[in-house]
Image (cartoon, grey):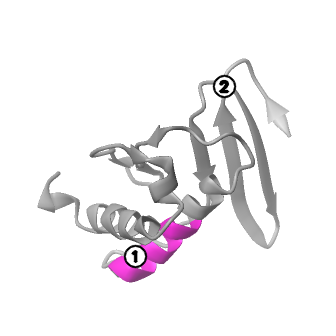
Amino acid sequence: MRFSDAAVWVESHGIDRPLVGVAVCYSGQRSVWLPLHLPDTPDVQVLADQVGRAVRTLCDVDLPAPGRVAPALDVLRPGRAPFRVPPRDSLPFHELTGPLASDVAVELAARLAFPHLGP
């Protein structure tokens, strides 16, 4: 576990495993980083499964639940410019842990796969 004056985080990696981690800022913001397979022609459902795994990881952090969350993605790919899928809206945290979690993952994945379709 590591910490700074802004956050606490844990990360893991190895020779045969890519870097993965979870951070919680003292403000309450939660972040997760993990490898995301993003081919030139992405499959939205495959991306949604990967994004859904990240959403579940953030929801499983054993801390008091925030009232509302605003899901977003930041994607870093070697040799390419960073890409951000900003939040469109906030929703109650309990909806992110229920049946709507897959809908949120699909929406973020679609916006990531097809950024030219607009907000």
- Dot 1 falls on a residue whose secondary structure is loop
Q: Nearer the viewer, residue 113 or 40?
A: 113
Q: Amino acid at mark 1?
A: Pro
Residue 105 lies in quadrant:
bottom left
Label 2 sits on residue: 26
Label 1 sits on residue: 39
Q: Which mark is residue 2?
A: none
Q: Nearer the viewer, mark 2 or mark 1?
A: 2
Relative to 74, 109 lies left or right: left
- Specify whether residue 54 is in view: yes
Magenta portion: prevailing SS class: helix
What is the x, y in percent for residue 80? 39, 53
State yes or no: residue 49 in magenta. yes
Q: Residue at x 50, y 65 (%)?
A: 98
Q: Farthest residue in the left direction?
A: 117
Number of residues whose C-alpha sits closer than 10 Å to that of mark 1, classed few (under 14), some (14–19) or many (20 or more): few
Q: Which residues are magenta?
A: 44-53
Q: Residue at x 45, y 71 (%)?
A: 99
Label tally: 2
Q: Amino acid at mark 2?
A: Tyr
